[in-house]
Image: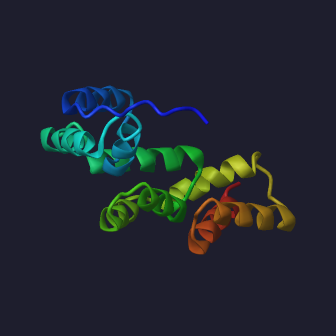
């Protein structure tokens, strides 16, 4: 077992590390604090994260926007997004608002297009497999069925 390095109690150093992390990508409050706890004491982390929030350098809303963009890009649905966001410490009410503001039918149709490439009519087996894959990716049954029906309606 490796010996642990002593954790710094310097809030200024913790703030510098937090800003370095936030310069690379958005972090949620909880996620940022967990990263900082690797090298700093809880008191230094609390002070650094509090300052980041107070100054607007860390925002749960921006972090959630990043998660929504990632979910769309990765072909994931609202249930998967909600699970991941709450697990990362985002307020469930904020997550519900973000999910309600998105058009998940479009995201399901795009994910279906990647699962069923080509223009031809998919077979029943292909449709069933695609439906199951969309549901595993966190889309609701209604969104999955709408995406499949929309695919049938295309020439």
Indicate the quadrant where residue 80 lies. bottom right
Q: As rendered, which of 88 and 148 lies closer to the eye?
A: 88
Query: Which residue is more in the foreground, 133 or 148?
Result: 133
Q: Give the answer, above or below, for where 114 lies relative to 143.
A: above
Q: With respect to residue 67, does 135 lie above or below? A: below
Quarter that holds the N terminus: top right
Residue at point 46% right, 62% down? 82
Specify how the rendered protein is coloured: rainbow
**Residue 12 versus residue 100: which sits nearer the camera?**
12
**Residue depicted at 51% across the width and 48% down the height:** 72
Q: Position of residue 17 (x, y in %)?
A: 31, 28
Name which residue lies at 30% across and 40% down. Answer: 41
Q: Which residue does the image show at 22% across and 38% down from the upper left? A: 48
Q: Where's residue 102, x and y in %?
A: 40, 58
Question: Image quadrant of residue 139?
Answer: bottom right
Q: Which quadrant: the C terminus?
A: bottom right
Judge left or right: residue 1 versus residue 7. right
């Amino acid at each position: 077992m490796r010996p642990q390095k002593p954790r710094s109690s310097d809030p200024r150093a913790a703030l510098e590390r937090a800003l370095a992390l936030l310069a690379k990508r958005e972090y949620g409050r909880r996620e940022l604090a967990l990263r900082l706890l690797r090298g700093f004491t809880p008191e230094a982390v609390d002070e650094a994260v509090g300052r980041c929030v107070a100054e607007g350098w860390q925002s749960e809303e921006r972090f959630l926007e990043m998660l929504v963009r990632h979910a769309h890009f990765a072909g994931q649905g609202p249930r998967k997004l909600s699970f991941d966001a709450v697990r990362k410490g985002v307020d469930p009410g904020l997550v519900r608002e973000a999910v309600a503001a998105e058009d998940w039918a479009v995201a399901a149709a795009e994910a279906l297009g990647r699962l069923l490439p080509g223009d031809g009519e998919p077979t029943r087996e292909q449709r069933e497999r695609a439906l199951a894959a969309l549901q595993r990716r966190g889309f609701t049954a209604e969104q999955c069925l709408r995406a499949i029906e929309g695919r049938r309606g295309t020439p």
